[in-house]
Image: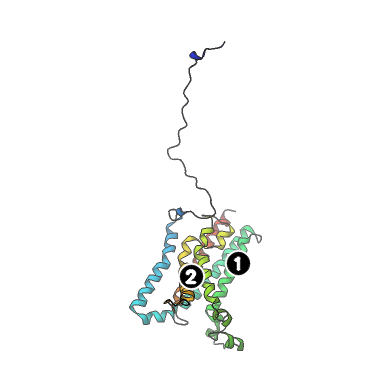
Amino acid sequence: MHLSAKYVTSVPVAAPVAPRYAPTVRPRGRGPTLGVLRDALPGEILVAVLPLVFLLIVGCVWYVDPVAYRALIREDGPFESMQFVSYAFAALVGVYSADRLLRAVGWRDVRVLLLLAFGCGCFFIAAEEISWGQRLLQIESGEFFMQHNLQQETTVHNLDWFAGSGLLHNAFILVGLAGGLGWLLKEARSNGWRDVLLADWYCALYFLPTAAFYTQWEYLNRLGFYTISHHQELFETVLSLGFLAVALSNLVRARRIAASR
């Protein structure tokens, strides 16, 4: 039996109601969004502002008591000792993180090699900071280092072809920029090889001041501008603390990866 259209009554269909508290799904991009600060943990914010606090306190010391400040930055002084401790501890943490990750994922994972290379690199820098124990053991430099080292000590970074040519300052600039801006290439809350290789956003202010300091010293000086010098130990100390922060961050990441296996 066919019904006439005038007897057909349409039944209204209720439109779907969106849940009152719909979960927000954020796309996983190739880099952190501007919301990284909004999602930051309290510990990350604390780590991020520590270098500013350190620079502010030391700046006050320099302004109030220049003699005390010069004692801090002198050769084999407190800041140089702090650099050695920071790099040595970062080396130990880096090797331990590599071992922790190795037990979970094996040698074929590139992240293990990156952590191991990081630890070995920090060990090399720590040894350079104390001239490989030369002054501690009262060992005289060999003929090569007496002729080619700007400080006549057994170190690589003060060789004339490296430190005297500006390569050392440019190396500081590149490391500072890579450590301060590399987080823009990372994935937020991720554990990939890029996240192990590059510093997190909260480590940026440990690296960028060093890049800025050596940029103005190396390049603005050539253009005839007034430049700030003789403060390199201060900025290199902040940089060493940045490497330690990166090592501890990677340790947390390695533990998280191992726990998920």
Residue 128 appears in view: yes
Asked which secondary structure carries label 1, the reply is: helix
| Residue drawn at (49%, 76%) of the image | 218
Residue to which mark 2 is pinned? 211
Q: How was the colour assigned to the protein in this rendering?
A: rainbow
Q: Residue furthest front?
A: 223
Q: Quadrant of residue 67?
A: bottom left
Q: Nearer the viewer, residue 178 or 220?
A: 220
Q: What amino acid is found at the position of numbered circle 1 in the picture? A: Leu
Label 1, label 2: how many angstroms apart (C-alpha)? 25 Å
The residue identified by callout 1 is 116
Q: Position of residue 66 (x, y in %)?
A: 36, 80
Q: Residue at left 53%, top 69%?
A: 175
| Label 2 crowd (10 A; few <14 / some 14-19 / many >=20) | many
**Tag of residue 209:** none
Q: Amino acid at mark 2?
A: Ala
The reply to whether residue 254 is in sight is no
Q: Position of residue 74 (x, y in %)?
A: 44, 82
Q: Residue at x 48, y 70 (%)?
A: 211
- Locate residue 140, reporting x and y percent: 57, 88
What residue lies at 59% left-to-right and 59% top-to-bottom?
A: 193
Badge 1: few (under 14), some or many (20 or more) residues near its Cα, within 10 Å?
A: many
Q: Would you say 163 lies left or right of 43 here?
A: right
